[in-house]
Amino acid sequence: MFKRNRRILLIAAMVILLSPLSVLTYMYVNERAGGLADQRISKVWGLSEPIQIPIANSPERAVQEFRGEFDTSQFIHQEAVDGGMILFTQKKGRENNSNLQMEYTRKNIFGWKWVWGGGYSISEGQHTKFALDYMSIPKLDKVSAPFPMLFGNIKDSSIKRLYVETKEDGKVIETEAKLVEVSHGHLIWYVFLPPSAAIPYVMKGFNEEGKLITHEQIKDANDSGSLTLRK
């Protein structure tokens, strides 16, 4: 009887010791470059071979190592989200266009890992006056990320508030965008939409008096472009 109880205790102790090791092993297999997480992202991209996303010691480094860009872009803003960090960058030396890049990185026990990103570059003509530009990032299939979202540059200082309208079961849901001054006179905006949000989206920009001065209906979840002021 004593030997049997001792055997049971030994087995229980081994299970207790091996369980954390098993969890750690799975997490490593999932997070390593080319691992399960990378395979899921590769499937979203339609790739037959998994991409290799390195693990870094900071959100910025995770972006730089994946993109291979260390000197051509500058980080202008970041915001913590559930489980990770959203970062915004701009290309250096592009004075004649409006460009903005969004990157989402996720934190795990090994460090930081790039998950998703997107950006745009729009040429600015001498005789064209834009109110704002935008890019839409759709919700991803089988990839955990704070999407759908929209983001962009504010080009006209008269825009003080910006909303994005979506519909769910016939009910209009209005989500206010966050406007952030990243440098003197330079504002960016971004908004995280409800996970159930589906196109079309309606963007509405208002001035200080609450007057609607720009609006646009977005029919493509991967769309980008510019809005002008209403005449």
Image (cartoon, rainbow, N blue to C red):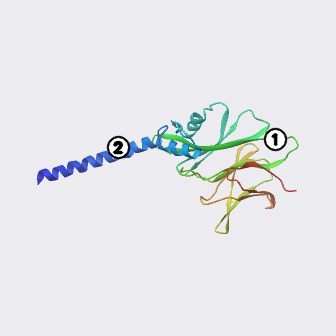
Q: Secondary structure at mark 2?
A: helix
Horizontal and vertical percent for residue 110?
46, 40
Residue at 70% x, 53% y is 220
Between discs 1 and 2, the one toward the N terminus: 2
Q: Amino acid at mark 1?
A: Glu
Judging depth in this view, the residue of 80 and 28 nearest the camera is 28
Compared to residue 203, the image places residue 35 above or below, namely: above
Residue 156 seen:
no
In the image, 154: left or right of 67? right
The mark found on residue 219 in the picture is none
Q: Secondary structure at mark 1?
A: loop
Q: Quadrant of the C terminus?
A: bottom right
Q: Amino acid at mark 2?
A: Leu
Q: Which residue is mark 1?
A: 124
In the image, 49: left or right of 208? left
Q: Residues within 10 Å of mark 2 (few under 14, many from 20)?
A: few
Horizontal and vertical percent for residue 12?
24, 51
Residue 165 seen:
yes
Residue 177: name its quadrant: bottom right
Horizontal and vertical percent for residue 211?
81, 61
The residue positioned farthest toward the bottom in the image shown: 170
Q: Quadrant of the N terminus?
A: bottom left
The residue positioned farthest toward the front in the image shown: 48
Residue at 81% x, 53% y is 158
Q: How many marks?
A: 2
Residue 197: name its quadrant: bottom right
Q: Which residue is mark 2?
A: 21
